[in-house]
Amino acid sequence: MSSSSYVVVPRCSVIFDGTNYGEFVGFMRIHMRGLLVWGVLSGVVPCPPCPLAHVAPTPPVLPVLAADASQADRDVAKALDDAAVDAYDQQVSSYLDALSVYRNDLSAYTQWCNDDAPAVVVLTASVLPQFPSEFMGLGTVAAMWSYLCQRHQPSGNALYLGPVWNHNRL
């Protein structure tokens, strides 16, 4: 059994060639919806911020009393120790809450990245080779799609003048 070293990319059935913008956009929308990444491509599902991990609290350093410390000194030290431990316990509790939020945020961010990556591959495979160089430096597939749309979508003048020119040729 032989193994192949290539990955099949599910390209859109209409390849953008610079002249078929309207048809390409319609088919691309259907295609990306079928792959469940239209929201990422269109920007409806924006990139969540990359979460920052919180730093775990540092345990308190409890004071060491001399062997000949008085009972009053021991009582004061015990009260200070108890207060420090209580404060540390509260910090740990807050840290654990923040850690739970961080894990959820990281999961959402990772899922978005996992959706963005194949959408970039499909977009670049669905246009002729000269077009990806126009938008490959952009950070997200939504930015790439937006650039492609802004650059190649017919303007209002083109939409108006096209039929006028065709009428004048008759």
Image (spheres, grey):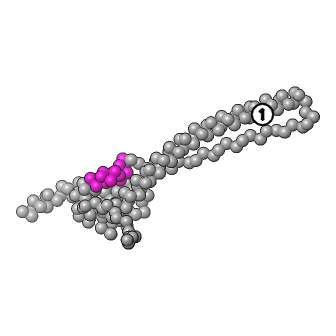
Q: Of helix, strand and loop, which mostly describes the magenta segment?
A: helix
Q: Which residue is mark 1?
A: 81
Q: Is residue 131 above or below residue 30?
A: below
Q: Nearer the viewer, residue 71 or 164?
A: 71
Q: Residue at x 58, y 47 (%)?
A: 53
Q: Nearer the viewer, residue 68 or 5?
A: 5
Q: Seen in the image, is 53 located left or right of residue 114?
A: right
Pick out the residue farthest to the bottom: 2
Residue extent of the magenta highlight: 29-44
Q: Is residue 128 above or below residue 52?
A: below
In reply to whether residue 131 is colored magenta, the answer given is no
Q: Residue at x 25, y 56 (%)?
A: 27
Q: Amino acid at mark 1?
A: Asp
Is residue 154 in view?
no
Image quadrant where one finds the C terminus? bottom left
Q: Is residue 162 above or below residue 130?
A: above
Q: Seen in the image, is 68 located left or right of residue 117?
A: right
Q: Seen in the image, is 108 located left or right of residue 145?
A: right
Q: Is residue 159 above or below residue 130?
A: above
Q: How far across and down, in percent of the image, does residue 49 sit?
A: 49, 48
